[in-house]
Each structure stands twice: as structure tokens, then as C-alpha cells.
Image: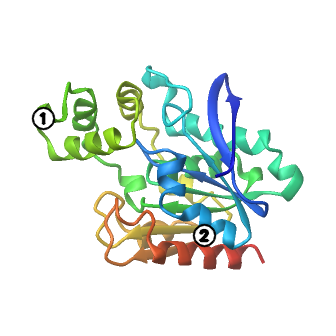
């Protein structure tokens, strides 16, 4: 377990942990998850530390131990990307190591894409997990997810997608009202033209059964230095800690850091 700490990002308290003593990489979790569930419980931190990295896990605003906010205006992905950049600055990673790689899963991948666009001088490479071409095409169902989160009990949730997210949010011990505000925030559109402006190496890793994320190959083609990793036999939830995913990321980092 790494060092437990917090910092202020635009006045919002963000919780983070630094693990290991090697080369830094910042990890950004998905919706309704947190740094522990997404990266420690799945074995990612152990794998990265063993490979000589010092992964930095963070709890996104409204998630985990970070500050809970109940107004959707605080949760656009572009705003949450400021927390990633703020953490890099707080730890003085660029001053100490130069630009650093970042990796996000699902919502975290979207956040990382905006971080790479808006704070390019801080970032050396990007790994987008669990979100392929649907980063551009978008996803429906947010209203059903919000309704599922705000229902008095799981038994009252009528839609399948609402039930899935409610079960996961309950499993992670999340603040349901904060998550509902996050899911109900304005979706800042991100286009192929936007993404083509990301000049650093990008790995897009999505399960071949992931209907939420969509095609890794189609998204990877947009980036000037994009690569695709299709995680065989995995859907959105079960790809997170997959060995294929981990091996592909380690190989990618080794290539782009040379």
C-alpha cells in the first residue's frame, strides 16, 4: 500500500496514493470505481511496481475518498482532467522526471484524453482502456443510470443498465448522489479532429466483447501515433485486470519510453 495523501485541485480535495520508487505513471479510474478497486484490487499496481514503475493512483472527484460534490457542473470530463494535471504538478513529476505517461479506464480514459489535449506538456504517452470508438460516438443510457443510482433500493431499479451500475456502486461503497451528479453532467463532445491533435503515443485497449467501449482499432486509427490492443474474450467489466491488457501495456510503455 502506498503513501496516503490529498491535494487541492481548484479548491476540491483529491485523494491519491504513490506506490513504488520507479518511473511515475498516473492511473485514472472509471465511473463508480476508485483507485483501490480499479488499480490495486486488479493487480495493476503490483505489476507496474515489479516492472520498475511508481504508479500514482487517484480517486476522481466525487469518488472514493475524494471530496463529494452534488452539482453536475463540477463533473465534465474536461474539468476532471484538470485534477490529473494538478496531481502531476503537485508531485512535481515533470520537474523530477519529465513528461509522464497516464492511463485511464472507461470514464478515466475519457478524462485522460482531455488531459492529453489540454496539458500536453505534462504527458509522454496515453493508455485508453475500456473505451474505443464510442469515445467519439457517445453512449446512451445515462438517464437510466442516474435513476438507478437514486432509487431507494436495488429492487426498485427496473432497467438492466441501471441495475448493473447500482450493483457496482453499492459494491464500491460509493456516494450514490455524488455519482448521480457525475453521470448527469454535461458531456463535452470530443471529435476525431480533437483527438488527432494528441501527438504522443496512444494505446487503445478494449475487450472484444465490450459493447460499451466499442472498437479499439477504429479509435486508434485517429491518433498520429495510435496502437490498438483487443483484449480477447473480455467485456467491459472483466477486461479491467486481464493479463493480456497488462502485458500489452507493459510492452507499450517499454517501446515508447526508449
* Residue identified by numbered label 2: 47
Q: Which image quadrant for residue 15?
A: top right
Q: Which image quadrant for residue 238?
A: bottom left
Q: Give whichever of discs 2 and 1 has the lower sequence position.
A: 2
- Total numbered circles: 2
Q: Above or below — where is 77 with respect to 106?
A: above
Q: Above or below — where is 228 with respect to 153?
A: below
Q: Are marks 2 and 1 in contact (CB under 8 Å)?
A: no
Q: Which image quadrant for residue 72?
A: top left
Q: Position of residue 165 (x, y in %)?
A: 28, 43
Q: Secondary structure at mark 2?
A: helix
Residue at the (61%, 65%) spot, across then down? 46
* Dot 1 crowding, Cα within 10 Å, few <14, some 14–19, many 20+: few
Q: Would you say 233 lies left or right of 254 here?
A: left
Residue 224 visible in the picture: no
Q: Camera-side residue: 199 or 94? A: 94
Q: Position of residue 74 (x, y in %)?
A: 51, 26
Q: Above or below — where is 38 with respect to 11?
A: below
* Dot 2 crowding, Cα within 10 Å, few <14, some 14–19, many 20+: some
Name the disc covering residue 198, or none. Answer: none
Residue at the (36%, 59%) spot, across then down? 213
* Residue identified by numbered label 1: 155
Q: Above or below — where is 198 with respect to 110?
A: below
Q: Secondary structure at mark 1?
A: helix
Amino acid at each position: 500500500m502506498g503513501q496516503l495523501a490529498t491535494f487541492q485541485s481548484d479548491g476540491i480535495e483529491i485523494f491519491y496514493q504513490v506506490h513504488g520508487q520507479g518511473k511515475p505513471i498516473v492511473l485514472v479510474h472509471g465511473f463508480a470505481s476508485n483507485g483501490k478497486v480499479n488499480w490495486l484490487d486488479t493487480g495493476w499496481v503490483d505489476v507496474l511496481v515489479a516492472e520498475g514503475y511508481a504508479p500514482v493512483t487517484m480517486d476522481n472527484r466525487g469518488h472514493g475518498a475524494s471530496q463529494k460534490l452534488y452539482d453536475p457542473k463540477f463533473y465534465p470530463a474536461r474539468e476532471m482532467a484538470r485534477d490529473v494535471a494538478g496531481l502531476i504538478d503537485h508531485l512535481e513529476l515533470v520537474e523530477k522526471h519529465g513528461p509522464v505517461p497516464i492511463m485511464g479506464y472507461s470514464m478515466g480514459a475519457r478524462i485522460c484524453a482531455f488531459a492529453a489535449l489540454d496539458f500536453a506538456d505534462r504527458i509522454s504517452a496515453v493508455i485508453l482502456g475500456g473505451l474505443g470508438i464510442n469515445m467519439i460516438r457517445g453512449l446512451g443510457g445515462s438517464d437510466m443510470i442516474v435513476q438507478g443510482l437514486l432509487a431507494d433500493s436495488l429492487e426498485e431499479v427496473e432497467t438492466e443498465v441501471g441495475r448493473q451500475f447500482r450493483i457496482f456502486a453499492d459494491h464500491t461503497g460509493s456516494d450514490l448522489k455524488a455519482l448521480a451528479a457525475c453521470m448527469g453532467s454535461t458531456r463535452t463532445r470530443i471529435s476525431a479532429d480533437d483527438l488527432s491533435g494528441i501527438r504522443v503515443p496512444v494505446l487503445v485497449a478494449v475487450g472484444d466483447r465490450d459493447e460499451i467501449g466499442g472498437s479499439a482499432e477504429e479509435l486508434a486509427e485517429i491518433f498520429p501515433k495510435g496502437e490498438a490492443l483487443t483484449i480477447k474474450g473480455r467485456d467491459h467489466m472483466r477486461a479491467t485486470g486481464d493479463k493480456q491488457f497488462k502485458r500489452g501495456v507493459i510492452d507499450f510503455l517499454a517501446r515508447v519510453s526508449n
